[in-house]
Amino acid sequence: MICNLCPNRCNVDRATRLGACLTPADRVAVNRAAPHFYEEPPISGQRGSGTIFFGGCTMRCRYCQNIAISRVPRGRMCTAADLVDLIKGLEDQGVHNINFVTPTHASHLIRAALDRYRPAVPVVYNTSGYECVEVVQALAPYVDIWLPDFKYADRALADSLSGRPDYPRFALAAIAEMLRQKPCLYRDGLMRQGVLIRHLVLPGHVDASRRALDALRTLGKPALSLMAQFTPMPLCPELNRPVKPIEYKAVLSYAEKLGFDDIFIQEPESTGTQYIPPFELSNEGNRNP
């Protein structure tokens, strides 16, 4: 498999050499498969979102909350057939949807799994937003709910904090394609189809959040989730505190000023390591095949 699934365009055969995601072609690290109750209300509902957390990542965000699994993927190595078993197990627990978290580098395995078995509940693609439009197009028949981040509109900030200066261009184009595909559809308070864009407010970067909202407004008035849950991480010492309530309120006020009217908000106290899921790091580790 010569892999160009993400904007890194590694162009390597993942059967013999690992690319930026550090993941082989035929399997992917899974570090948690369980109902999750801390997504947005129309995603988690009462019975939880059936999250499948993948190890590895196409980005290098220094403030990543899931850095225990994103930088050095390890845990249970799963094939497409294994993913089918996980999906069925989560369905049996009564979850509202199947939620693939950090899925970009495993998108080919997700498609293969869903070709074998399509769950009766919606499929959620929970992504950093660093996607190629052609991959988003290929996933259209498989994904019901797109849950992308839009982290930055600034190349310099994207480079400094995530090592991906081209993030704004790729994320905005990918989100535009998601919005083209899936208008929002709710039933009984739950999202059944559509796009919900997440933006994490960073401490000391209110202006950057305003510019991100300006960029999203060029796509219309999509549903937003403004997140206050930033948790300081050791690899990013310049962001060494939570977001202040006044910073979060300033970003929320700006979103309302721009005309966004479908906004999910977080309380400022929704931060801390207690909200990081208990990942499973044992079992077979990742290795260069």
Image (spheres, grey):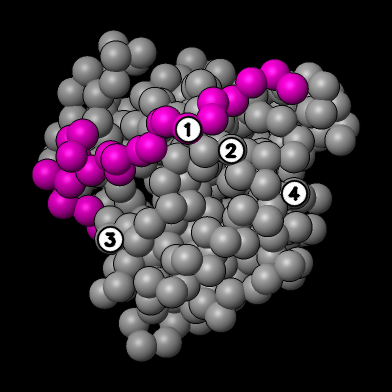
Is 161 placed above or below 88 here?
above
Residue that label 4 marks = 108
Contact (Cβ within 8 Å) of mark 4 with mark 2: no
Numbered disc in front, either 1 or 3: 1
Instruction: Mark 2: give few (<14), some (14-19) or many (20+) Cα within 10 Å.
Output: many
Residue that label 3 marks = 37
Q: 149 or 68: nearer the eye?
A: 68
Q: Which residues are magenta?
A: 262-289
Q: Position of residue 146 (x, y in %)?
A: 56, 61
* Mark pair 3, 2: CA separation: 25 Å
At horizontal 54% and vertical 73% (from top left) the residue drawn is 122
Image quadrant of residue 159?
top right
Q: Amino acid at mark 3?
A: Phe
The mark nearer the N terminus, 1 or 2, is: 2
Furthest residue in direction front, as rendered = 283
* Mark pair 1, 3: CA separation: 25 Å
The mark nearer the N terminus, 4 or 2, is: 2
Instruction: Mark 3: give few (<14), some (14-19) or many (20+) Cα within 10 Å.
Output: some
Furthest residue in direction bottom, as rendered = 188
The mark nearer the N terminus, 1 or 4, is: 4
